[in-house]
Image (cartoon, rainbow, N blue to C red):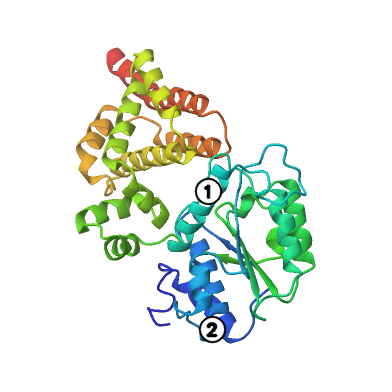
């Protein structure tokens, strides 16, 4: 397969080959489930497949310039729909249109996010109070899936982060999957396939997406985003297989966040409760949970480097290697595997809307127990030996 096929989508050669084969043999299913780590191109691939199916050039590659391609590029095509989590409006009922009870400001934010997603299919849609895919949205999907299309081609409905559907929405999409329309193809994307109903998973053709290589992310950052080579190399490492995470790290004050991780660890291990509480208050005050998740992810990667150093490997945070080595020298008996598990659990809790301050307080207690218990035991042995 040629390297230039579907260049808008980074990597994923195996997935591209499978989808192109299905296209060429006219064997596309009525429903796909694209699953894999966050930020590896599941939505991007779904949108590219929709573009190919509707491109007026009738080729296996979308031209990008025809009327249909332009409309999909701005997410304005009548037969291509992107479904995602939305806030619940005041007094909203389950049979209301999804946007009917939202404020003008919320609708403005949604339109802005759609525009950004159209410009960059790797953009992570972020809307305040949007934590679930509403039953209203899925009922609209069910209604539209039975309608005729505008251009006699397949309607493509993409349900992004399908694991955010609640029980009622999941049962409704299941009915649609059980009674497929020949003119509609559903593409569900998810980084947490295990959260979906097994019956939903079994009624879709499952396509696994791989983490992106460090080199694929680095090249994309340089060529698509104009990032300098040295910074691109560092961010690509910190992206940990996710182009979306790498992009978000570019937008943030990365150096400050990484220093904040070290400060949090020091405060958690120290004896000054007031300082630790102030640090947790500051982290809890951020507007979006995604920011806390990114902070915890950076912490996870820092401790991953601790573990790698303990095993003689090469670290990701090269510019913090001195701090990492000092930590390993001071706390050689710390339980890093349990620490990483606790951070992963904290990320999961934040994503499930658990109170951020409570999550961080609990994590600070766990860090101290995992790291200092072994350290104190070793010191006691040295004193008594």
Work out whether 353 lies above or below 282. Answer: below
Residue 160's spot in the image, x, y percent? 58, 57
Asked if residue 242 shows in the view, the reply is: no
Q: Relative to 146, is 333 on the left or the right? A: left
Work out whether 70 lies above or below 383. Answer: below
As measured in the structure, the alpha-carbon distance from the residue carrying label 1 to the one carrying label 2 is: 31 Å
Q: Name the mark on residue 39.
A: none
Q: Which element carries disc 1, helix, strand or loop?
A: helix
Q: Quadrant of residue 323?
A: top left
Please state, as top left, top right, bottom left or bottom right, where the N terminus lies in the image.
Answer: bottom left
> Please, which residue is most extreme toward the front here?
104
Asked if residue 258 shows in the view, the reply is: yes
Residue nearest the viewer, comparing 310 with 280: 280
Q: Does the CB distance between marks 1 and 2 fall below 8 Å?
A: no
Residue nearest the viewer, comparing 312 with 3: 3
In the picture of the structure, the residue carrying the numbered disc 2 is: 56
Residue 200's spot in the image, x, y percent? 71, 59
Which callout, 1 or 2, points to the residue nearer the camera? 1
Q: Which element carries disc 2, helix, strand or loop?
A: loop
Please report the residue visible at 51 percent of the width from the left and 56 percent of the height from the top: 114
Residue 172's spot in the image, x, y percent? 77, 55
Please report the residue visible at 62 percent of the width from the left and 48 percent of the height from the top: 164
In the picture of the structure, the residue carrying the numbered disc 1 is: 108
Q: Relative to 222, is 167 on the left or the right? A: right
């Amino acid at each position: 397969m040629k390297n230039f096929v579907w260049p808008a989508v980074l990597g994923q050669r195996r997935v591209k080959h499978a989808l192109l084969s299905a296209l060429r043999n006219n064997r596309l299913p009525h429903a796909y489930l694209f699953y894999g780590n966050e930020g590896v191109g599941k939505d991007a691939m779904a949108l590219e497949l929709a573009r190919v199916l509707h491109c007026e050039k009738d080729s296996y590659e979308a031209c990008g310039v025809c009327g249909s391609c332009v409309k999909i590029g701005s997410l304005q095509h009548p037969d291509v729909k992107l479904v995602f989590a939305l806030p619940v409006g005041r007094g909203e009922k389950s049979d209301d249109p999804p946007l009917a009870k939202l404020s003008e400001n919320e609708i403005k934010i949604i339109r802005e996010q759609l525009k950004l997603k159209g410009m960059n299919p790797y953009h992570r849609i972020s809307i305040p109070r949007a934590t679930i895919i509403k039953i209203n949205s899925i009922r609209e999907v069910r209604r539209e899936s039975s309608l005729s299309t505008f251009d006699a081609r397949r309607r493509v409905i993409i349900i992004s982060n399908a694991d955010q559907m609640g029980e009622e929405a999941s049962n409704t999409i299941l009915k649609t999957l059980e009674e497929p329309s020949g003119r509609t193809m559903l593409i569900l994307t998810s980084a947490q396939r295990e959260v979906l109903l097994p019956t939903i998973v079994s009624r879709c053709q499952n396509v696994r997406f791989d983490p992106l290589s460090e080199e694929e992310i680095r090249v994309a950052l340089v060529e698509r985003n104009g990032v300098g080579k040295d910074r691109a190399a560092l961010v690509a490492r910190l992206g940990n297989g996710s182009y979306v995470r790498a992009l978000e790290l570019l937008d943030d004050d990365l150096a400050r966040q990484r220093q904040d991780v070290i400060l949090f660890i020091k405060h958690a291990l120290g004896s000054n409760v007031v300082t630790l509480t102030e640090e947790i208050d500051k982290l809890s005050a951020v507007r979006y949970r995604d920011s806390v998740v990114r902070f915890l992810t950076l912490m996870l990667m820092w401790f991953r480097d601790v573990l790698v150093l303990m095993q003689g490997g090469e670290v990701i945070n090269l510019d913090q290697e001195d701090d990492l080595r000092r930590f390993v020298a001071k706390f050689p008996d710390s339980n890093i595997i349990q620490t990483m598990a606790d951070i992963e659990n904290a990320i999961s809790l934040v994503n499930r809307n658990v109170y951020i301050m409570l999550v961080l307080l609990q994590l600070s207690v766990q860090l101290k127990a995992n790291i200092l218990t072994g350290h104190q035991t070793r010191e006691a042995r040295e004193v008594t030996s």
